[in-house]
Image (cartoon, rainbow, N blue to C red):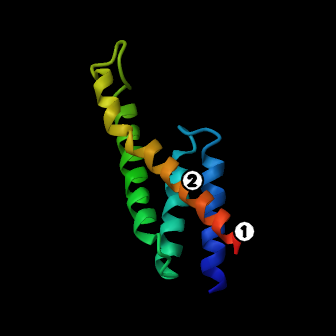
Amino acid sequence: MKWIRITYIIGIIALIAGAIDPLEGSVIIVGGSALIALSTQLTHDRHRRIFLITSVMITMGVCLMLYFSSLGGFGGASTLSWWWCLLILPYPIGWLITIILLIIKAIKKIKK
């Protein structure tokens, strides 16, 4: 059980450290969200499904962001319009939901 707790903590650190530079740190954020989802799944946390869904959202958004970046980005001289940015929205939304849920869990733990 100790390694599950360590995995959870490493996931939180990766999620926060990757946010320093959301573009370059996006791969770190994907790894961190996957570690959190894995550790909550193994401990049968009551929020495990939300962590799993947000991890999938983050992974989808980052994969699409990297794909669009390989095509030359959005707007300007690129062939992609700005509307394609909507497909990247699961990445920041998933990250934000994960952070909010981690804060709620920390507050509940402190109150106990």
- Residue occupying image coordinates x 48% and y 63%: 34
What residue is drawn where x is 35% and y is 13%? Answer: 77
Q: What amino acid does circle 2 point to?
A: Ile
| Depth order, front residue of 48/9 | 48
Q: Which mark is residue 33?
A: none
The residue that disc 1 covers is 110
User: Residue furthest toward the bottom?
Assistant: 1
Quarter of the image for residue 83 reads top left
Label 2, secondary structure: give it.
Answer: helix
Rendering coords of residue 54 (x, y %): 42, 57
Determine the residue positioned at 49% across, 81% down. 42
Residue 75 horizontal/vertical position (percent): 35, 17
The amino acid type, in three-letter code, at marker 1 is: Ile
Closer to the camera, 52 or 84?
A: 52
Q: Which residue is mark 2?
A: 99
Q: Residue 50 lies in what quarter of the image?
A: bottom left
The quadrant of the rendering that contains the C terminus is bottom right
Q: Is residue 62 left or right of residue 24?
A: left
Count of labels shown? 2
